[in-house]
Image (tube, rainbow, N blue to C red):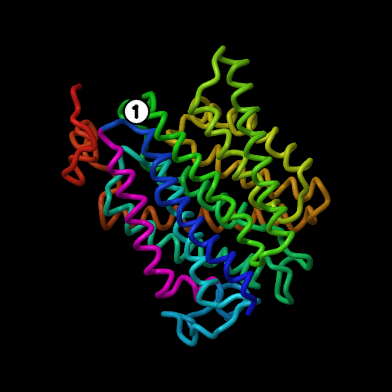
């Protein structure tokens, strides 16, 4: 057990939780209408609570147990056999559990952006719980837990998928699930509405940016030069994507918006996530530069051409960004094309099948969408009996 490594991962764990609470909640909350902001906060907060318990009960064991190529089994359910003295690498295993728990929290929380303003709260809770255990945890095992895609003896690819901090495990899975849920839900009654609080969006994005240092830097699981490089390239990609998003928006529409610029920040962060353990600053700058334009264009493709109301552009920003980062690892020669593309295909198919199956199952038990009257009233009041503001119109 190494004291410096332990201290750094303690900090990184707090930073990644900070990404969801309050970072993601504020980012998403500012983007919706005033009558729905508390419902977004509630969804993010409740997901954080429920995923934490489920990660203890079975999620951690499924992802990081010693089972087989497909899942980790249940030997570590309820942290069976894990004590304060148990070691994972150079840190306490209980700390590794907590660090990975924050990833299990933010991944289903990312999906929130696709269904805000029209989804039933009970559906969110049941779906998110099952999705984390059946979709996210096995994929984490396949890539990070020595399973199907990790390059171990039983792996599909001898050299393994290179996904440092979650381009596939977090962003691809959340992006695909978001798109599927948006299709099942259908569009909002009034889909083209401006964010009710751009300042809140910026504050949330800034918190996400800071928290991402723990997300990527902490994935090194050590206090060393690799962690420092991961933080540095993360920052460079985020900054560059912010600039190119704003510049492209200025070229296309004549004005660069605050909401656009900080959305570019998130696109740059998502895109560098899988590559942050391998690339240098120049490669990171290139990744961010492309992400800022590419993800912006994909937002329009999803909404205007495919006609899917992925409300807050989860697939275009997170899904496409994460997939792009995975591919760039092969482009720059840091991973094999076979493993990277194969990993994307395997996880893409798994996520699609599981998500569709869970949506069909859960909506047979609880309503997936609120009534038209509840949607008009706003979910803050109709679902939670509260208002964020005294509405005047």
Q: Position of residue 309 (x, y in %)?
A: 42, 33
Q: Position of residue 164 (x, y in %)?
A: 67, 58
Image point (80%, 45%), residue name: 331
Image point (23%, 40%), residue name: 380
| Mark 1 surroundings: few (<14), some (14-19) or many (≥20) residues within 10 A | some
Q: Is residue 189 above or below residue 114?
A: above
Q: Quadrant of residue 393?
A: top left
| Dominant secondary structure, magenta | helix
Q: What is the residue that sits farthest to the bottom in this orientation? A: 81
Q: Which residues fall within the magenta stretch? A: 35-63
Residue beneath disc 1: 196
Q: Position of residue 74 (x, y in %)?
A: 48, 80
- Kind of element beneath mark 1: loop
Between 372 and 24, the one lying in front of the other is 24
Q: Is residue 280 above or below residue 195?
A: below
The N terminus appears in which quarter of the rendering?
bottom right
Verify whether residue 128 appears in magenta.
no
Image point (51%, 55%), residue name: 15
Tell me if 381 is positioned left or right of 42 in this view: left
Between 229 and 171, the one lying in front of the other is 229
Tell me if 27 is positioned left or right of 299 in this view: left
Image point (39%, 45%), residue name: 25
Q: Is residue 23 above or below residue 10?
A: above
Tell me if 176 is positioned left or right of 52 in this view: right
Q: Position of residue 143 (x, y in %)?
A: 64, 65
Q: What is the residue that sits farthest to the top in this orientation? A: 254
């Amino acid at each position: 057990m190494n004291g410096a490594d332990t201290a750094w991962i303690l900090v990184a764990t707090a930073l990644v939780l900070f990404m969801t609470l309050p970072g993601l909640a504020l980012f998403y909350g500012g983007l919706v209408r005033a009558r729905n902001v508390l419902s977004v906060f509630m969804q993010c907060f409740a997901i954080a609570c429920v995923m934490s318990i489920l990660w203890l009960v079975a999620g951690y064991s499924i992802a990081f147990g010693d089972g087989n190529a497909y899942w980790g089994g249940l030997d570590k359910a309820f942290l069976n056999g894990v004590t304060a003295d148990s070691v994972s690498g150079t840190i306490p295993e209980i700390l590794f559990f907590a660090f990975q728990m924050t990833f299990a929290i933010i991944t289903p929380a990312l999906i929130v952006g696709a269904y805000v303003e029209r989804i039933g709260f009970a559906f969110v809770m049941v779906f998110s719980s099952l999705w984390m255990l059946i979709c996210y945890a096995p994929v984490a095992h396949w890539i990070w837990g020595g399973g199907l895609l990790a390059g171990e003896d039983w792996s599909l690819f001898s050299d393994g998928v290179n996904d440092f901090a979650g381009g596939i495990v977090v962003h691809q899975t959340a992006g695909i699930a978001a798109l599927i849920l948006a299709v099942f839900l259908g569009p909002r009654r009034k889909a083209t509405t401006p964010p009710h609080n751009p300042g809140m969006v910026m504050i949330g994005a800034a918190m996400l940016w800071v928290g991402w240092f723990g997300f990527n830097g902490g994935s090194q699981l050590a206090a060393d030069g690799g962690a420092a490089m991961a933080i540095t390239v993360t920052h460079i990609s985020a900054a560059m994507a912010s600039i190119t998003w704003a510049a492209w928006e200025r070229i296309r529409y004549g004005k660069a918006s605050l909401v656009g610029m900080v959305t570019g920040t998130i696109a740059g962060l998502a895109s560098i996530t899988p590559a942050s353990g391998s690339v240098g600053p120049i490669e990171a700058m290139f990744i961010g530069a492309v992400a800022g334009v590419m993800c912006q264009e994909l937002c329009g493709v999803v909404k205007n051409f495919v006609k899917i109301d992925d409300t807050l552009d989860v697939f275009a920003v997170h899904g496409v960004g994460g997939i792009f980062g995975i591919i760039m690892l092969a482009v720059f020669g840091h991973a094999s094309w076979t493993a990277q593309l194969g990993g994307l295909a395997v996880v893409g198919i798994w996520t699609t099948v599981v998500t569709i199956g869970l949506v069909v199952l859960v909506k047979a038990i609880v309503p997936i969408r609120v009534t038209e009257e509840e949607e008009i009233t706003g979910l803050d009041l109709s679902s939670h009996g509260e208002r964020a503001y005294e509405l005047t119109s």
